[in-house]
Image: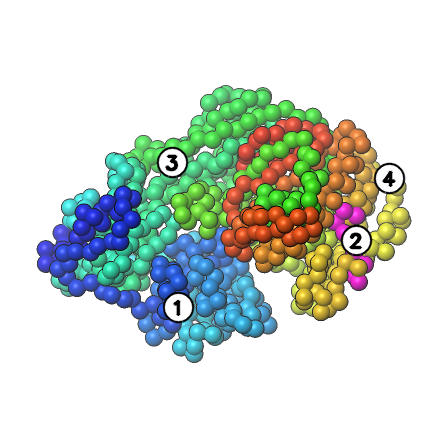
Amino acid sequence: MINPSNRPLVLSALTMAILAGCNETNTEYVDVEREIAESIDSGPYGCTDEELESSPNKDCRLYIKGSMNSWSAPPEAQFHYQGDDLHIALFKMEAGSYSFKISDPEWSAERDLAIGAEFDSQVTTDVLYELQRKYDDHKNQNMDIVVDGQDQIYKFSLDATSGINNPTLYIENVTEADVETTSSKIYLTGNFNEWDTLDSYAFDYVGAGNYQVTASFEQQQDIQFNLVQNLDGKELIYGALKNQLIDLKEGASALTTYPGGVMHASVDAGTYIFGISTLGDGQLAVPVSISKVRAHSGYDKLTTPNTEINIGADGSTHASSYDWKVDSEAVRLVDDARFVDPTFRQLATADSEGRYQVQLTTNKDTHSETIDTHEIDVVSVDEANNVILMIGDGMGYAQLDVTRAFKGEALFMDSAPHRGQIHTASADTLGYEKLAGLGMNYYTDSAAAATAMSTGVKVVSGTIAQARPGDGSDLETILEHAQKMGKSVGVVATSHCVHATPAAFVAHGPNRNDFAQLSDSMFGDVQPNLAICGSKQVKDVDVISQAALANDYTVVKNRTDMLEAINSLPAEDAGAEIKFAAIFGEDEIPYVIPSDHQQSNGWSYESLDIPHIQEMTEVAIDVLSRNPNGFFLMVEGSQIDFAGHINDEERLIHETLKFDDSVEAAVNWAESRSDTTVIVTADHETGGLELVKTNGTGEVPEVTWFWGNHTNVPVPMKAWGLNSDVVHGRSVDNTSVHSIMLGSMPAK
């Protein structure tokens, strides 16, 4: 038990009312019998006075943020300040290839650290790298790292002795040397265990400097607690700083120190895991986090009879076992062998139409057992000869609202006879997007979202059509499935050809930014019949054109040559033998309204003789439809997303208008026949855009932006032609897009 002379800070009854949400009066601290620390030395990257003045609760800690954690700032990815300008992080990663930076949660300019833009982005262990802080004209770039083997633990040492602008980074693999470094136990004490240091509330080491303890609560309540370590007879009581209220929330962590005041959290009935991270005894600053044990089986899904779908426990927290049940014998569940624990994911197939409920129980028959359910709607579809999927990258409801306001009339996309929406979470963000107040920090990237639609399998951000999580094997895409059926296949994009979304349909790889590897995969392995998209320079080489030429594609670089070349292609291509690539731009395709950089280089659609996306789509349909066995085509309006990232409303509008033209072209072709399905959707929304006020036709409306990142809100799904009715009124997981397309092109 805590020594009575060091008893915890007691809050007045007024304060407890505040914590319960009953009062807006300022917190009042009373009855303090021990000195409470007033500050924590956070090192050279700590919050500035100006930052704290504008945001008193700002988190200025450094985190490893990358494709391995959806570019978020989870507690286990933070650095610990060791004094003398040195920060250290122990971080566990699975096998894969990842991009990352070091930053605070908000990507503040003071703390955006990575390798300089002029250097090779690849980093390895046991090499000292000089980093560049991104500010003014000083640029940096994502760092890339390859991890071999599962559960690898790395030590990241960031040394700012030479100044905050150019710290050094040294990475070591310490997997074999990872051991507990505290000599005495750290305890969770609080009003729920009479402030005792009980063995049942002692933190256990779980690796990479992380410790956990489990606590269960029978009802919703506000709890008060501290962390206690006894070193050589001295109690170190970790908690809040003087005159600071720590109200701990799921998904975030709070920095504690000793001697500290009481901390608080609101809990529901259930089991929680308290986590801390420390590199040794008596560490001055120890972060603490809280997470509820929960099952999460995912969003409702839509599929067709005898079409296999992938369901999983992604989003479940602190689960050691997975038990699946379905309410009908019409649905078969098979373990997914791509996982170390094959019960983590299930392969589900339904014999007949119907609406079925799937139940996931984690930690069955234990005190932390939790249950979650979702529904699978199985509907019949007709076989389609052609399937066209059109993706407006970053195109949420607001992007359509703003573009419509500018146009002064309905968009063509508004004419869709059938409309639904999809949920976009990736394998590493599913469930976390629902956390109150913090869910906004958990959102998919385009690679994971496009992979969900192309393969029907959820993956972690940054992954291109591979089973990650899982064994890393290639996942068959809908485009490859269509190839097996003798159909012609192709992609159109206003990005470069192996940007995340198109790549997820025509390539496989662990890292969305390895454009050379993805180009080789696309043109060397998958070999679509057609690609109309942009170029990409890597070390002064257009790796996309290089890969296409090396694999005997007909390659053209401008509209004039494209139109001439397609007239020379076979009038009929029943064997799907055409290999045609139109690769535009000096280094990607410019905006419809060129940026300042593009203008300074003289780059525009007109100067570079590039067709707009409507004509790209028309040419793609012309070429692919020469195969009487049908075709699959994916079209992406890529730069809607690009404009969203920089909060450029005008460019976003014009990119969306051009995409709308391409949708109209595809639908007009499809509706001239009865064998084609057209689905239009988005991979995610970008920017948190909201229309505030229209200003009339041709005038840019007034809007607000939340930030320059993706968001996790549902995005629209619209459909025309054959089977379009199955999407109507649905709000389903994004993997359902794959199920609809696969059901429309059943294997022979």
Q: Point out the tag, 4 or 1, that comes first from the N-terminus.
A: 1
Label 2 close to label 4 by CB (< 8 Å): no
Kind of residue at disc 2: Pro
Residue to which mark 3 is pinned = 362
**Residue 685 part of the magenta segment:** no
The alpha-carbon separation of the residues under discs 3 and 2 comes to 53 Å
Mark 2: few, some, or many residues within 10 Å (few <14, many ≥20)? many
Residue 191, how many percent across, how many down?
19, 46
- Secondary structure of the residue carrying tag 4 is loop
Q: Nearer the viewer, residue 373 or 602?
A: 602
Residue for point 42% across, 69% down? 158
Residue 332, compared with residue 628, is above or below; it is above
Find residue 525 and report its horizontal and vertical position in percent. Answer: 69, 50
From the top left corner, tell me how far across and down residue 109 is, in percent: 48, 67
Identify the residue at image location x=47%, y=74%.
165
Q: Name which of mark 3 and mark 1 comes first in the sequence.
A: 1
Q: Nearer the viewer, mark 2 or mark 1?
A: 1
The amino acid beneath tag 3 is Thr
Question: Residue 471 or 616: which is nearer the viewer?
Answer: 616
The residue located at (43%, 37%) in the rendering is: 296
Q: Out of 537 and 393, give the one closest to the viewer.
A: 393
Give me the C-alpha separation between circle 2 and circle 4.
24 Å
Disc 1 target residue: 50
- Helix, strand or loop under label 1: helix
Question: Would you name the residue on which mark 4 appears?
Answer: 572
- Specify the segment rendered in magenta: 607-615
The Cα atoms of the two marked residues, 3 and 4, are separated by 54 Å
* Mark toward the start of the polypeptide (3 vs 2): 3
Ranked by sequence position, the earlier of labels 2 and 4 is 4
Q: Which marked residue is nearer to the observer: mark 3 or mark 1?
A: 1
Q: Which residue is mark 2?
A: 611
